[in-house]
């Protein structure tokens, strides 16, 4: 009866609670509308007041400005005006007039104007006021504390340097809202005005306590930071009365107006009734639950006892069993629970074993340790005679005949005196039972016992050669394939040697689960090995990149690459072959194992083969086609032709969208892998080279620079044939890419270095290199005790040539002299363009006499040369020698230059030698070498003429 009454009362309570809730929501919406309207009205009132104050200040400022401009005694007039204005505005506490930062007038509210500053504003207050004025930007500013009292600061400009200030009592703002709230009781409605700096301007309740105080922690201020207006219900920080609040911002000043109405005035008793109805409903539900529980417990006490024991089993306490002796339904249920407990215990043991195996996989990266742990745990858990884990060895071939199972992981039960397998590798074969198990790719169990004595049936061909093995002692066996994404990679084999055994479904599932974990472990091990290999390769690449960046010496970079690559790959020899003057590829850099003979300088092609890898049509007329150690040169040539056609024909027609077009070719895509050099037809042409190198297997990658073959990187295995892995080929290709960059950088560096030390017009060395080289030659000559001579050459009348024929003809004459110098000078001599028309020649290990003869030969050759348009040219030469005529580089240049100018001043087209008179060093002798060398020739000509006259 009580439950029936409660069932009738509960819907009524629910209906009443819902009705009260709807009324509560309606009152809340009305409260939001009312507070929002009051907040908007308050903002409008505040805006009108601020506008009125601003207008009054502006009108007063205009009047002060006119008085200041029209009257001589303007200060007195202004004081009167300010006093009248202050009297008309009861809330203006002070009127201040500042000109150029100085206070010129101060009027208190309700007092006469007074220009004296004593007893008025202190210097500290005045300084604070000036700082505040610099920060203020509006006409009516935020609250300002002056002399311990809070004011609202109003300001307006009178003139360019003059400002009128009004200190307004905050009570003026309070008076605006005196009619809004009515009673000032703390539980009544409240209106608060907060300025832009989050300080209270006015508050209708406890105004004297809050005016000028920081109000930033109030919830209304925090809520107003993110939006312009809004509503909420809360208990404020000023008093404990719950209120419904609405806030809004005054648009001009940013001041915040907050309106709060007590929730008790809004909701009345509806809120209390709602809470009461909810409490009654909760009590009714609780009583119903308690009564239902008591009734259920009374009728199902026996079942609850059974369930409690079952829950204990479910929590893992398998030691408990349900003790129900009856043979009715409860007894059957108890026996079913006991059987379930036994199954759960076995399943727990299996899961624990799988968990231990998984834990060993997570904690260790040693695959051997993981697999040994797996066979031990599995064998002990199944109480088998032997547990084996065998991996398939395909010998990296597609032929199934040579596939073997490698039994590297075996556990034996010592209690059954079972020995390990003597034969660790078995040949699977093609038509054997083991091959069918692998192909079936699912767990299988079978009996191998065929009769008394435990011999195997001859028709049961388990694998190739099993008759004479120790597998004959096995009576029952379970085999489970280990399968990964790449297929079956091995088997888990469980042997029972002492008896025939029927494997349960739980045991089959256990072995299958362990096989899945083993497959995962093997995949992780392979991934770890791959990651470690990739990390090592990355370190090698980084080391090569570092060497490329740290050195611009190409030989150093290439030697480092060959050494590091050989050590990283475990190869026997690493070589770099490069073309030499469009000729055959020659081994220029090599690193090899100790005991191998160096083959540096060896040519890849035989002497009878005329083949140039970088020629425009590099075709090798052999059966192998157009290849270099398996590298297809036609791809490089096609890419080069494509690049040239794009550069010469297509690029001018491309629009802006084709600006990122690239024709670069990666070395990685052209890597050649040769596992057997003796049988690979791509190596037939290079038989002589491979025999001298002794390579059995190789990897070759091209070094490509600008779509042109700049070399070949070759990795040799000389001790035996090697089956290269894919990651090794990628590594060689990546290193070749870096080497291609290094070669390009080295060539660019050499080009820039050459441009830095040579003259652009003549191709000779420039002035800077000439002076550095001269200093080096003098230091070397000083150590060796040998002379160094210097010849200075000056093209005669270059200015006249430029003025008459133009600068191109003058440049041609300079180039003609440079060409003569390049032709006649020795390999160890250094010629440079010293100035505009002046040249310098450094002659190491050359005496002054030898230098004079060389200079005369140069003078004669220049005299005999011909320049287009200009015709014949001449030059003046001067020479001096170290250490007889000079002791330093600057002194040697100076004396050779003096000899040069003596030659120019003596008629040009001649050679002068600086010979210092040791008895009179200040009077050097300049010998005319040209005239001295011409005397014997002239005397011979005169003798011939006299002889002809006598005849």
Image: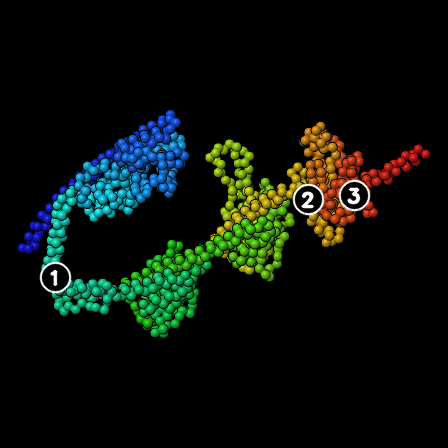
The residue under the point 84% across, 40% down is 932
The residue under the point 60% across, 48% down is 578
The residue where tag 3 is placed is: 914
Please identify, in this view, whether the residue under mark 1 or under mark 2 is nearer the observer: 2
Q: Is residue 40 above or below residue 471?
A: above
| Image coords of residue 202 (percent x, y) | 25, 40
- Do callouts 1 and 2 mark residues in contact (Cβ within 8 Å)? no
- Gap in angstroms between the C-alphas marked 3 and 2: 20 Å
**673 or 454, nearer to the observer:** 673
**790 or 327, nearer to the observer:** 790
In this picture, residue 438 sits left or right of residue 721: left
Determine if residue 626 is in view: no
**SS label for mark 1:** helix
The residue where tag 2 is placed is: 770
The residue where tag 1 is placed is: 297
The residue under the point 58% across, 54% down is 559
Q: For the C terminus, which image quadrant?
A: top right
């Amino acid at each position: 009866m009580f439950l029936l009454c409660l069932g009738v009362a509960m819907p009524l309570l629910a209906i009443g609670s819902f009705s009260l809730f709807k009324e509560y929501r309606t009152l809340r919406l009305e409260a939001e509308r009312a507070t929002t309207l009051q907040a908007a009205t308050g903002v409008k009132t505040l805006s009108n007041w601020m506008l009125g104050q601003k207008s009054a200040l502006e009108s007063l400022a205009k009047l002060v400005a006119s008085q200041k401009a029209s009257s001589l005694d303007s200060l007195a007039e202004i004081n009167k005006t300010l006093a009248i204005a202050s009297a008309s505005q009861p809330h203006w506490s002070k009127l201040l007039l500042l000109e150029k930062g100085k206070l010129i007038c101060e009027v208190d509210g309700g007092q006469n104007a007074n220009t004296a500053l004593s007893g008025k504003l202190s210097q500290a207050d005045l300084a604070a006021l000036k700082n505040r004025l610099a920060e203020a930007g509006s006409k009516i500013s935020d609250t300002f504390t002056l002399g311990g009292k809070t004011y609202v600061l109003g300001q307006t400009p009178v003139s360019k340097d003059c400002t009128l200030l009004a200190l307004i009592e905050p009570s003026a703002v309070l008076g605006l809202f005196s009619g809004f709230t009515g009673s000032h009781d703390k539980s009544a409605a409240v209106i608060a005005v907060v300025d832009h700096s989050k300080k209270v301007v006015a508050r209708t309740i406890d105004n004297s306590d809050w005016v000028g105080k920081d109000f930033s922690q109030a919830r209304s201020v925090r809520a107003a930071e993110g939006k312009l207006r809004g509503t909420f219900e809360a208990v404020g920080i000023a008093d404990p009365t719950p209120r419904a609040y609405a806030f809004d911002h005054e648009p001009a000043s940013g001041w915040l107006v907050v309106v709060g109405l007590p929730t008790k005035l809004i909701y009345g008793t509806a809120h209390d009734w709602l809470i009461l109805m909810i409490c009654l409903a909760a009590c009714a539900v609780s009583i119903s639950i308690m009564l239902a529980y008591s009734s259920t417990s009374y009728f199902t006490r026996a079942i609850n006892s059974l369930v409690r024991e079952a829950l204990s089993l479910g929590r893992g306490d398998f030691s408990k069993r349900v003790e129900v002796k009856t043979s009715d339904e409860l007894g059957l249920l108890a026996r079913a629970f006991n059987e379930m407990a036994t199954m759960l215990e076995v399943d727990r043991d299996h899961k624990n074993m799988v968990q231990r195996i998984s834990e060993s996989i997570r904690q260790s990266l040693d695959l051997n340790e993981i697999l040994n742990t797996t066979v031990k745990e599995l064998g002990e858990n199944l109480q088998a005679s032997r547990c084996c884990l065998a991996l398939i060895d395909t010998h990296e071939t597609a032929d199934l005949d040579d596939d073997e199972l490698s039994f590297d992981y075996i556990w034996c039960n010592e209690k059954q005196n079972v020995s390990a397998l003597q034969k660790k590798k078995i040949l699977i074969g093609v038509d054997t039972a083991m091959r069918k198990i692998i192909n079936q790719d699912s767990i299988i169990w079978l009996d191998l016992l065929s009769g008394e004595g435990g011999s195997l049936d001859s028709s049961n061909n388990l694998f190739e050669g099993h008759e004479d093995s120790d597998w004959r002692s096995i009576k029952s066996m379970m085999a489970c394939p280990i399968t990964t994404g790449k297929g079956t990679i091995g088997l888990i084999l469980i042997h029972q040697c002492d008896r025939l055994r029927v494997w349960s479904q739980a045991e089959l599932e256990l072995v299958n689960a362990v096989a899945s974990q083993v497959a995962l472990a093997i995949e992780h091990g392979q991934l770890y090995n791959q990651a470690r290999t990739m990390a090592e390769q990355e370190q090698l690449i980084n080391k090569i990149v570092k060497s490329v960046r740290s050195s611009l010496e190409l030989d150093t970079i290439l030697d480092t690459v060959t050494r590091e690559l050989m050590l990283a790959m475990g190869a026997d020899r690493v070589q770099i072959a490069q073309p030499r003057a469009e000729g055959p590829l020659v081994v220029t850099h090599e690193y090899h194992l100790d005991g191998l003979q160096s083959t540096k300088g060896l040519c890849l092609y035989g002497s009878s083969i005329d083949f140039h890898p970088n020629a425009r049509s590099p075709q090798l007329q052999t059966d192998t086609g157009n290849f270099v150690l398996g590298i297809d040169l036609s791809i490089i040539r096609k890419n080069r032709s494509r690049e040239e056609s794009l550069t010469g024909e297509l690029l001018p027609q491309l629009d802006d969208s084709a600006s990122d077009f690239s024709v670069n070719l990666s070395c990685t895509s052209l890597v050649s892998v040769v596992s057997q050099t003796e049988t690979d037809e791509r190596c037939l042409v290079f038989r002589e080279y491979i025999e001298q190198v002794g390579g059995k297997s190789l990897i070759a990658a091209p070094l490509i620079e600008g779509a042109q073959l700049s070399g070949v990187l070759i990795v040799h295995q000389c001790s035996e044939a090697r089956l290269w892995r894919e990651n090794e080929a990628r590594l060689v290709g990546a290193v070749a890419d870096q080497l291609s960059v290094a070669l390009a950088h080295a060539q660019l560096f050499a080009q820039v270095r050459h441009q830095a030390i040579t003259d652009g017009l003549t191709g000779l060395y420039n002035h800077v290199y000439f002076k550095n080289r001269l200093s080096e030659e003098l230091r070397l000559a000083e150590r060796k005790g040998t002379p160094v001579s210097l010849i200075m050459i000056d093209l005669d009348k270059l200015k006249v040539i430029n003025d008459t024929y133009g600068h191109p003809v003058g440049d041609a004459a300079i180039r003609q002299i440079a060409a003569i110098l390049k032709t006649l000078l020795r390999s160890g001599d250094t010629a440079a363009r010293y100035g505009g028309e002046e040249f310098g020649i450094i002659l190491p290990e050359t005496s002054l006499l030898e230098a004079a003869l060389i200079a005369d030969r140069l003078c004669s050759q220049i005299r005999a040369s011909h320049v287009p348009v200009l015709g014949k040219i001449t030059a003046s030469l001067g020479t001096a020698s170290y250490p007889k005529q000079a002791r330093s580089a600057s002194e040697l240049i100076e004396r050779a230059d003096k000899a040069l100018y003596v030659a120019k001043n003596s008629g040009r087209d001649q050679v002068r030698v600086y010979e210092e008179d040791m008895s009179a060093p200040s009077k050097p002798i300049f010998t005319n070498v040209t005239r001295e060398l011409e005397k014997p020739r002239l005397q011979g000509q005169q003798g011939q003429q006299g002889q002809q006259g006598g005849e």
